[in-house]
């Protein structure tokens, strides 16, 4: 992939292996927020949701808004026409549970 040499390979490896190792836990966070069966979600959207949920859980150094934005951009680039909107909705549902303090601080600052 063009530009991959600029990527953080350590973070990439952590995402790849972490999402595989924690797949069931990540799905447990995702499934309650879906409006259809998990098997009906596109693999791209599912992967973007896994990445977001994993980073919310295991990468506290990455701000929640950055996680959200990166996952939405991945879904826009590689997913279906409006898949990014679905990824956005699901991750916005997960973020307040996993990054409570950070999300509440952002919301309070905007108020």
Image (cartoon, helix red, strand yellow):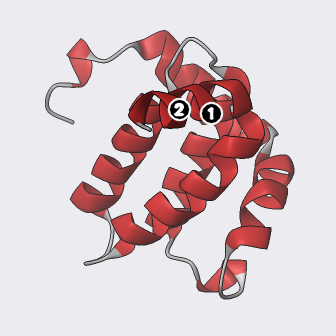
Residue at 45% x, 59% y is: 88
Of circles 1 and 2, the one toward us is 2
Q: Position of residue 22 (x, y in %)?
A: 80, 41
Whole-percent x, y for residue 32 in the image: 79, 70
Is 109 displayed left or right of 37 in the figure? left
Query: Is 90 placed above or below 4 here?
Result: below
Residue denoted by label 2: 108
Q: Quadrant of residue 2?
A: top left
Look at the image and tell me in which quarter the N terminus lies.
top left
Q: Residue drawn 58% across and 62% down?
A: 90
Question: Is 86 above or below relative to 1?
Answer: below
- 29 left or right of 70 in image: right
- The residue sitting at 76% across, 69% down in the picture is 31
Element assignment for label 2? helix
Q: Are marks 1 and 2 in contact (CB under 8 Å)?
A: yes
Q: Secondary structure at mark 1?
A: helix
């Amino acid at each position: 992939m063009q530009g991959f040499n600029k990527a953080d390979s350590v973070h990439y490896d952590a995402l790849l292996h972490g999402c595989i190792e924690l797949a069931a836990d990540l799905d447990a966070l995702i499934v309650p927020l879906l409006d259809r069966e998990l098997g009906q979600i596109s693999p791209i959207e599912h992967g973007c949701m896994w990445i977001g949920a994993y980073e919310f859980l295991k990468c506290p150094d990455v701000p929640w808004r950055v996680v959200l934005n990166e996952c939405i951009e991945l879904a826009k680039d590689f997913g279906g026409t409006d898949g990014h909107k679905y990824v956005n909705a699901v991750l916005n549902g997960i973020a307040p549970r996993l990054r409570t303090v950070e999300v509440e601080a952002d919301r309070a600052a905007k108020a």
